[in-house]
């Protein structure tokens, strides 16, 4: 029997979906190389940690471990001093510079701006003893020479590009930087993005949240986290890449405080001076780079030291820092008293701002929503939709479409692959179906749900956040 071209395309899509090969985004060779490097867990000593271990796609390219304020290193018992920020949308951060007009520092990478750009940043983690823990560049390059994608490195940078260690190391960072600039990290596919395009509607609460977020006399969040397009992109980035001291209290649960003197000479007295520490400038101490709020719902904990574990606490802090019961700032100098501290928001308003921030998670599915519950259902194809809401607490709706009547299984697994629920196991008619998943009995984290209908299988991730 002759197969039509569509059959092969379909088979490829199915295979790609099943085995997770390739990427949903078209990449150039250097970007593809950067992707291999970014996800290669063999590039740490001991092996096991990649960039993605602390910047995982399912956690908005931040650390998927929600329980620790900072990230664990490749060596057990080692911890960095700061919370892993998202590496997504950082490609838009300009190279670190002093803006004469605004009279402030802008851009760069890390909470304290100490790397000028993504390429410089990517050179750090491999050799950091609290992160990927390689003793030197040579060890990293030897691993790359032996990697399955070594030929791609040579294709991209030339036949001899892996011979000289420091040359190869710099090219490696270049490739990672190129990958971090791709659509895979910079998706602009949140509900809010579709709302701006007229393809999704915000709920009444989300709309109120957006208004309060923007209002100078209410949340005033947009003063530092702009919700409109700006100088660095045609899309809103939710950061102006400037630096500020919010007066965030010291986090006594930061395991770095208890690291041996070889890594933390000050011990429990350790104080993080942020930008001021890098520049050795008293005017800048206590200031940290304004983080993007894209994907913020899936990147807890929050702030440079991970002190807040949920978004309501963050907004409460902005709202009542100066009038409520909060521990004193870790660094008293340069605390911003003009734009936050006593916003006068009531509980419903705080909740609304949080609800708005929940619309900033990438991977929203406007098609599935628009066809929800009706005669509009696309019949004729199999499709597993992204759950909504996502993240969720405690329940969420999973929708799917069946091309024909089928025996359907819908199973839920935790991130280690253990099944936590047989949500559905029955025969259903063709068309669209929805089922509610209740995560009441489960703990916060990333879960996979898998649909099997006849020979069709698909799975997606969802995030339970309590
Ligand atoms: C052990 C966890 C860990 C690993 C592994 C790791 N990072 Fe990070 N990353 C962090 C932390 C923590 C910070 C913030 C550190 C700071 O500000 O001092 C950070 C910061 C960043 C930033 C800056 C984001 C911003 O808001 O300025 C980028 C980009 C980034 N990492 C990319 C990478 C890449 C690329 C790799 C692999 C080469 C990598 N990271 C490996 C934990 C990690
Ligand atoms: C004056 C500038 C400024 C204003 C106004 C502001 N922020 Fe921030 N925001 C920052 C800075 C700087 C940080 C990082 C501070 C730190 O870690 O010490 C931050 C951090 C955050 C974080 C944690 C991000 C993460 O990845 O950990 C959230 C959430 C947040 N802001 C939301 C808001 C909301 C909501 C408002 C309005 C109620 C707001 N911000 C107003 C500057 C600002």
Image: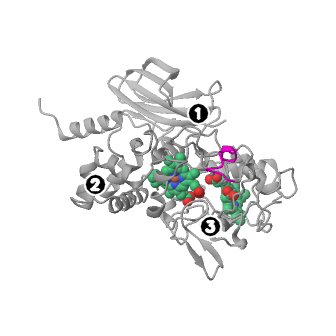
Is tag 1's residue or tag 3's residue first in the polypeptide sequence?
3
Q: Quadrant of the C terminus?
A: top right
Does residue 296 show up? Answer: yes
Residue 145 in the image, given as x and y percentages of width and height: 29, 49
Res 137 → quadrant: bottom left
State the extent of the magenta-drawn residues as a range. 254-265
Is tag 2's residue or tag 3's residue first in the polypeptide sequence?
2
Ligand 1 near label 3 (Cβ, under 8 Å)? no
Does residue 292 show up? Answer: no
What kind of element bears circle 3? helix
- Residue 153 image label: 2
Res 180 → quadrant: bottom left
What kind of element bears circle 2? helix
Calculate the distance from the C-alpha at mark 2 to the C-alpha at mark 3.
Answer: 34 Å
Residue at point 52%, 49% (across, down): 129
Residue at point 23%, 61% (across, down): 158
Task: Give the residue pinned by disc 1.
Answer: 396
In the image, taking residue 42 as reference, residue 442 lies left or right, namely right
């Amino acid at each position: 029997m002759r197969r039509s071209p569509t059959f092969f395309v379909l088979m490829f899509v199915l295979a790609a979906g099943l085995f997770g090969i390739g990427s949903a985004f078209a990449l150039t060779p250097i970007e593809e190389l950067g992707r291999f490097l970014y996800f290669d867990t063999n590039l740490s000593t001991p092996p096991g940690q990649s960039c993605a271990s602390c910047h995982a796609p399912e956690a908005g390219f931040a650390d998927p471990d929600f329980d620790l304020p900072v990230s664990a290193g490749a060596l057990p018992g080692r911890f960095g001093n700061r919370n892993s920020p998202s590496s997504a949308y950082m490609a838009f951060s300009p190279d670190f510079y002093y803006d004469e007009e605004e009279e402030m520092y802008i851009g760069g990478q890390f909470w304290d701006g100490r790397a000028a750009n993504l390429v410089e940043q990517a050179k750090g983690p491999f050799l950091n003893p609290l992160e990927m823990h390689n003793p030197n560049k040579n060890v990293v390059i030897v691993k790359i020479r032996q990697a399955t994608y070594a030929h791609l490195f040579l294709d991209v940078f030339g036949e001899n590009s892996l011979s000289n260690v420091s040359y190869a190391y710099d090219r490696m960072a270049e490739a990672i930087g190129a990958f971090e600039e791709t659509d895979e990290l910079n998706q602009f596919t949140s509900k809010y993005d579709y709302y701006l395009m007229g393809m999704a509607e915000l709920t009444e609460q989300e709309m109120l949240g957006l208004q309060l977020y923007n209002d100078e006399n209410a949340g005033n969040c947009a003063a530092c986290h702009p919700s409109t397009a700006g100088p660095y992109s045609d899309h809103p980035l939710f950061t102006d890449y400037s630096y500020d001291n919010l007066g965030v209290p010291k986090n006594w649960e930061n395991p770095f405080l208890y690291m041996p003197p070889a890594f933390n000479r000050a011990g429990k007295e350790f104080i993080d001076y942020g930008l001021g520490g890098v520049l050795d400038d008293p005017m800048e101490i206590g200031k940290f780079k304004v983080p993007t709020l894209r994907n913020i719902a899936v990147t807890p904990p929050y702030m440079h030291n991970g002190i807040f574990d949920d978004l309501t606490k963050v907004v409460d802090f902005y709202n009542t820092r100066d009038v409520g019961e909060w521990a004193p700032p870790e660094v008293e100098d340069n605390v911003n008293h003009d734009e936050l501290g006593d916003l006068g928001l009531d509980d419903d308003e705080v909740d609304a701002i949080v609800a708005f921030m929940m619309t900033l998670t990438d991977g929203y599915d406007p098609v599935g929503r628009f066809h929800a519950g009706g005669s509009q259902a696309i019949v004729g194809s199999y499709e597993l939709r992204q759950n909504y809401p996502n993240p969720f607490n405690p329940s969420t709706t999973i929708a799917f479409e069946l091309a024909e009547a089928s025996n359907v299984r819908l199973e839920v697994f935790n991130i280690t692959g253990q099944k936590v629920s047989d949500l559905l196991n029955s025969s259903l008619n063709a068309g669209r179906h929805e089922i509610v998943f209740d995560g009441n009995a489960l703990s916060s984290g990333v879960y996979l749900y898998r649909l099997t209908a006849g020979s069709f299988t698909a799975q997606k991730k969802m995030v339970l956040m309590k």
